[in-house]
């Protein structure tokens, strides 16, 4: 059944893309395929993506490579006239505005998972997903900017409640959704991570600058859902929940789909996700402050190690320690981490 739905969706999308694709205007309720967006938001510029989604030392390396080659960073990696999106709009807008779920798929075609429309209707949530944004697409130059472009364009076209804007994904798409939730907590107030999640504070899920991470810790809601028979992803979810709590993230919820393997969330799980994602994050301010103080001590200790190696004249070891620090603390360590890298690179 699912394969038939995917096949029919692919046929519909291809037909619409070839014949009826037009720039998006606020459309009637229901499913619209072959949608073209026209606005390039600044939050999806390449320089902003690098700033938010790469570690500071990786960003420094990118800038140095560009400078040495005499090139500049191209701010738009996409030509929106060639990109197509699928949009589903519930029949009635809630009094406070629609919710919005920007979905990052592992597959390359754009379709709405079976059974999700009724749940989107119940919660008043618009669904948008991009074609050509599957696991075979580049993360930084396609999957992430496509998701950001979709969010910004939908928010301009429809009355959207900023407090109910979520990013989600299945499998490989969930890993991308997690990165976006970390890097853009002022845009995405929560994330549906379906059968895919990484421990944060590592290269796969880089920590952003302190102001963004403070917001993520205290206001973002993350709903991790996994099939009860999908053991590998269950183990990943367990490790990631532990990681998120070590990094003082308050709004973490985990759920299992009974008797399910590695497949997209069913409608009942989607309903549980929306219920959880719309609930306020409960923050124990004293516990959060103590947790943050512990992280600050850990980072200070890592910087002290680098300083000691520099003082001892062991520059190569100091740089390796700094790279480890950069991978772990990401934007929290900037700008001091970048300043040390410049010092170590000097003759």
Image (spheres, rainbow, N blue to C red):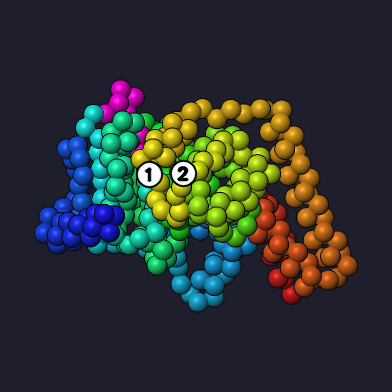
The quadrant where residue 324 appears: bottom right
**Magenta segment range?**
93-100
The 10 Å Cα crowd at callout 2, few under 14, some 14 to 19, many 20 or more, is: some
Considering every residue shown, the one lying at the far bottom of the view is 69
- Can you give x and y, in whole percent of width and height, for residue 4 in the image? 23, 57
Locate the N terminus by quadrant.
bottom left
Where does label 1 land, which residue? 266
- Can you give x and y, in whole percent of width and height, for residue 326 in the image? 67, 59
| Image side of residue 82 versus residue 144, left or right | left
- Residue 257 circle label: 2
Which SS type dominates the magenta stretch?
Answer: loop
| Image side of residue 259 versus residue 39, left or right | right
The quadrant where residue 295 appears: top right
Which of marks 1 and 2 precedes in the sequence? 2
Query: Of residues 117 and 52, which is closer to you in this image?
Result: 117
Picture residue at 21% right of the left edge, 32% below the top = 91
SS at badge 2: strand
- Residue 81 circle label: none
């Amino acid at each position: 059944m699912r394969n038939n739905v995917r096949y029919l969706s692919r046929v519909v999308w291809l037909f619409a893309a070839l014949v009826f694709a037009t720039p998006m205007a606020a459309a009637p309720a229901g499913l619209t395929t072959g949608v073209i967006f026209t606005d390039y938001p600044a939050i999806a510029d390449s320089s902003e993506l690098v700033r938010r989604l790469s570690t500071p030392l990786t960003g420094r390396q990118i800038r140095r490579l560009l400078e040495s080659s005499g090139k500049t960073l191209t701010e738009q990696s996409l030509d929106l006239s060639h990109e197509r999106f699928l949009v589903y709009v519930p029949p009635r807008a809630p009094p406070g505005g629609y919710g919005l779920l920007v979905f990052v798929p592992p597959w390359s075609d754009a379709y709405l998972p079976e059974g999700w429309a009724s749940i989107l209707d119940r919660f008043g949530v618009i669904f948008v997903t991009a074609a050509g944004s599957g696991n075979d697409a580049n993360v930084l130059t396609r999957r992430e900017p496509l998701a950001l472009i979709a969010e910004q364009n939908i928010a301009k076209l429809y009355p959207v409640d900023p407090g109910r804007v979520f990013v989600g994904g299945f499998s490989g798409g969930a890993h991308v959704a997690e990165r976006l939730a970390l890097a853009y907590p002022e845009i995405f107030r929560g994330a549906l991570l379906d059968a895919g999640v990484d421990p944060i504070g590592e290269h796969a899920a880089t920590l952003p600058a302190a102001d963004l991470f403070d917001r993520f810790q205290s206001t973002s809601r993350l709903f991790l859902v996994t099939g009860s028979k999908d053991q590998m992803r269950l183990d990943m979810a367990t490790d990631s929940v532990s990681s998120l709590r070590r990094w003082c993230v308050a709004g973490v919820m985990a759920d299992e789909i009974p008797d399910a393997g590695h497949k997209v969330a069913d409608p009942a799980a989607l309903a549980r996700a929306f219920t959880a994602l719309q609930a306020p994050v409960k923050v124990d301010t004293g516990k959060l402050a103590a947790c943050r103080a512990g992280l600050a001590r850990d980072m200070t200790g890592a910087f002290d190690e680098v300083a000691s190696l520099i003082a001892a004249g062991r520059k190569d070891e100091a740089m390796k320690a700094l790279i480890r620090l950069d991978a772990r603390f990401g934007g929290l360590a900037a700008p001091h981490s970048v300043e040390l890298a410049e010092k170590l690179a000097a003759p």
